[in-house]
Amino acid sequence: MYAYIIRRLLMLVPVLFGVSVVIFFTLRIIPGDVAQTILGTDATKESLAQLRKDFGLDRPVIEQYITWMSGVLMGDFGESMTTGREVLPDILNRFKITFELTILSAILSWIIAIPLGVIAGIKRNTKTDFTVRIVSLLGVSIPNFALATVLILILALTFSYSPPVGYVGLFEDPIRNLQIMLLPSIVLGTAMAGAVMRMTRSSILEILRQDFIRTIRAKGAKERLVIFNHALRNAMIPILTIIGMQIGVLLGGTVIIEQIFSLPGLGQLVLTSINQRDFTVIQGAILFIAFVFVLVNLLVDILYSYLDPRITYK
């Protein structure tokens, strides 16, 4: 296992290198002038030239990339073109909010999706099964931004309630933090719950057809033990796969929800940087998201061997 983890960590190098190349050179071919965007249309040629020189934009693109990557390898993601602040501390501060939102969304979805998926699998082709399948299909089909807008309207018009604006840390004021994060977590968790619910149902159905389940039942084991001790554990492999992928997607895909609920997370930072053409922040944020995504998938692979001892990585 240790050798496998080391190999996977070494694979981070070519993956992150590829991501850095794609994002860096893609940003450079986007039409428009960064200096003009930052200084405005009234800027003089001299001030534009000076700003390009300060940011190194007047140098060849390859040289710019080498300079940037040299800093990244030393832990220096550069400075923001618009605020002048160091990029990495800003990313880490914003990531804490996005990470909390992702974990809350995932926990809410698991609490709902896995039990309902198991019930639907056990009661196949019953009214309960059809109801769960319809709910899961709605969860997958409704866009997050539409669900968020509808929920805000319903709460405002029916209960005269509007979601709190801003962000308060979990350890500063847990109750206020929960009030702020609950609604966006429900919105993000709904789509995730729909997908996990469908996967749980199909996995349970597949496992219940296996010979070892028939053998366990023939030995007189209680149905609850058959489902939760044997069937669900073996069904968790594909469920865990989709959960890992969704967590990785959520870490980099909360842009719209953070914007709707005014959460200063990593997604909002990326969106603001795109609007301001702040290349340094965009490059650093996307590279950081890719790094976290690969680590999440590594953790999922490690959990496979815990759930199923037959899986080895020799």
Image (cartoon, helix red, strand yellow):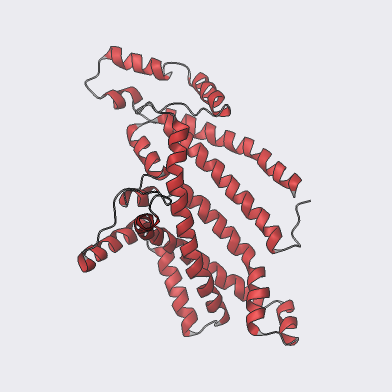
The one of 186 and 195 positioned closer to us in this rendering: 186
**46 is higher (above) or lower (below) than 242:** above
From this viewpoint, which residue is outermost toward the front?
A: 172
From this viewpoint, which residue is outermost toward the top?
A: 46
* Residue 137 seen from this side: yes
Task: Residue at 65%, 69% (x, y): give it.
Answer: 233
x and y percentages locating residue 216 in the rendered image: 73, 81
| Number of numbered labels in the structure image | 0
Task: Residue at 35%, 60% (x, y): give it.
Answer: 183
Task: Residue at 51%, 34% (x, y): give it.
Answer: 22
Left or right, residue 218 beside residue 147: right
**196 is higher (above) or lower (below) than 119:** above
Left or right, residue 306 beside residue 137: right
Image-quadrant location for residue 301:
bottom right
The one of 137 and 188 positioned closer to us in this rendering: 188
Task: Residue at 67%, 54% (x, y): give it.
Answer: 302
Left or right, residue 170 beside residue 154: right
